Image (spheres, helix red, strand yellow):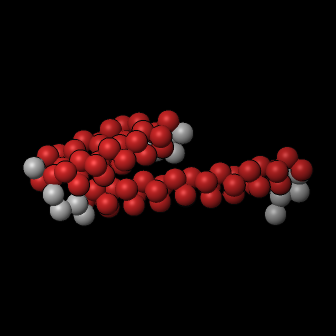
């Protein structure tokens, strides 16, 4: 266990950040699953817009790397285009 006051504080801050990041990653995963579960192009397009917004926000918050966000957006867009 940490003995220094600054180390204890750092552990508390990391725990808060970890919980926050987990929340945003879960939102991202659920949005991605929603897009992949779409049955037609119009529904997929609607869900894709929401998913892209979430991916961009997570990349901006540095929760995921910007290239990972770009790869996910590309993959989802390709899928939605195949529905149409």
Coordinates of residue 45 in the picture (x, y in percent): 23, 47
Image point (42%, 53%), residue name: 28
Left or right of residue 83: residue 67: right
* Quadrant location, the N terminus: bottom right
**Residue 44: image location, x then y, percent:** 23, 53
Residue 77 percent location from the top left of the image: 22, 44
- Residue in the image at 36% along x and 37% along y: 67
Left or right of 47: which side holds 17? right
Q: Nearer the viewer, residue 34 or 8?
A: 34
Q: Can residue 5 be seen at all in this image of the molecule?
A: yes
Number of on-image labels: 0
Q: Residue at x 47, y 40 (%)?
A: 57
Residue at the image position 82 percent from the left and 51 percent from the top: 9
Asked if residue 68 can be seen in this view, the reply is no
The x, y position of residue 37, in whole percent, is 25, 63
Q: Is residue 1 left or right of residue 21?
A: right
Residue 19 sits above or below residue 63 on the image? below
């Amino acid at each position: 266990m940490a003995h220094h006051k600054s180390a204890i504080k750092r552990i508390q801050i990391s725990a808060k950040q970890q919980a926050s990041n987990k929340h945003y990653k879960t939102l991202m995963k659920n949005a991605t699953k929603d897009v992949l579960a779409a049955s037609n192009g119009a529904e997929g397009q609607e869900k894709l817009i929401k998913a892209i917004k979430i991916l961009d926000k997570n990349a901006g918050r540095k929760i995921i790397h910007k290239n990972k966000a770009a790869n996910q957006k590309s993959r989802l867009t390709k899928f939605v285009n195949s529905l149409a």
